[in-house]
Image (cartoon, helix red, strand yellow):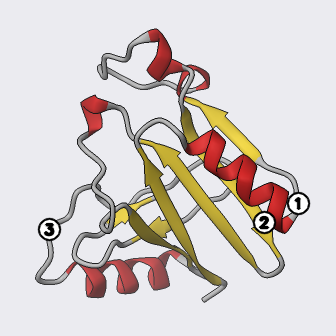
């Protein structure tokens, strides 16, 4: 296993939060907006298109990651607005970990490959997903 990192979700203020984190921890933000990505059939307002689809702040051997959650993707509730991102050494390890974490839970997003700043899979406390 290469790493296990936190992934935080916000209701439109991710950039503000991560700018604060950068001011405290230092480092450089890696940021992608929804307007930079193919969002498929998801309908987004102009404000949401400018939202953060993915941000990463490398911190030593860890990376703090996050994103805004447009209304079309659901509602963010404080206390459940996080996941863990797992960077596996192999596809087999990713499958094993995903299967173990999703057993008995509700999968909100199937395991897949992310072609953004970091490729990873994640699993909130009771839901498995890919990042």
Which residue does the image show at 29% across and 78% down from the upper left?
A: 125
x and y percentages locating residue 75 in the rendered image: 25, 44
Mark 1: which secondary structure?
A: loop
Q: Nearer the viewer, residue 21 or 69?
A: 21
The label shown at residue 74 is none
- Name which of mark 3 and mark 2 comes first in the sequence: 2
* Position of residue 21 in the picture relative to residue 17 (left or right): right
Task: From the viewer's perspective, tell me whether residue 49 is left or right of residue 83.
Answer: right
- The answer to which of marks 1 and 2 sits earlier in the sequence is 1
Q: Residue at point 88% right, 62% down?
A: 26
Label 1, label 3: how many angstroms apart (C-alpha)?
A: 35 Å
Determine whether 27 is above or below 101 in the image: above
Q: Residue under label 3, please give it.
A: 106
Q: Give the foreground label among 1 and 3.
A: 1
The percent position of residue 60, horizontal first and vertical second, equals 83, 78
x, y percent for residue 128:
29, 69
Residue annotated with mark 2: 58
Residue 87 appears left or right of 68? right
> Would you say the residues marked 1 and 2 are in contact, meaning their CB atoms lie under 8 Å apart?
yes
Camera-side residue: 6 or 22?
22
Q: CA distance from mark 3 to mark 2?
A: 29 Å
Q: Height in image: 116 above or below 130?
A: above
Q: Indicate the quadrant containing the N terminus: top left, top right, bottom left or bottom right.
A: bottom right
- Badge 3 density bin: few <14, some 14–19, many ≥20, Cα 10 Å: few
The residue at which mark 1 appears reads as: 27
Residue drawn 33% across and 72% down? 124
Mark 1 and mark 3 lie on one chain; the one further toward the N terminus is 1
Foreground: disc 3 or disc 2: 2
Callout 1 crowding tier (Cα within 10 Å): few <14, some 14–19, many ≥20: few
């Amino acid at each position: 296993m290469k790493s296990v990192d936190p992934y935080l979700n916000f209701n439109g203020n991710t950039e503000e939060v991560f700018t604060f984190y950068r001011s405290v921890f230092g480092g450089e933000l890696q940021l992608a907006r929804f307007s930079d990505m193919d969002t498929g059939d998801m309908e987004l307002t102009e404000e949401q298109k400018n939202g953060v689809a993915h941000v990463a702040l490398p911190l030593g051997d860890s990376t703090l990651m996050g994103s805004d959650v447009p209304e079309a993707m659901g509602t963010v509730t404080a206390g459940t607005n996080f996941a863990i991102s797992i960077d596996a050494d192999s596809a087999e390890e990713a499958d094993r970990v995903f299967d173990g974490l999703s057993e008995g839970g509700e999968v909100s997003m199937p395991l897949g490959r992310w072609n953004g700043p970091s490729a990873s899979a994640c699993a909130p406390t009771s839901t498995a997903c890919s990042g």
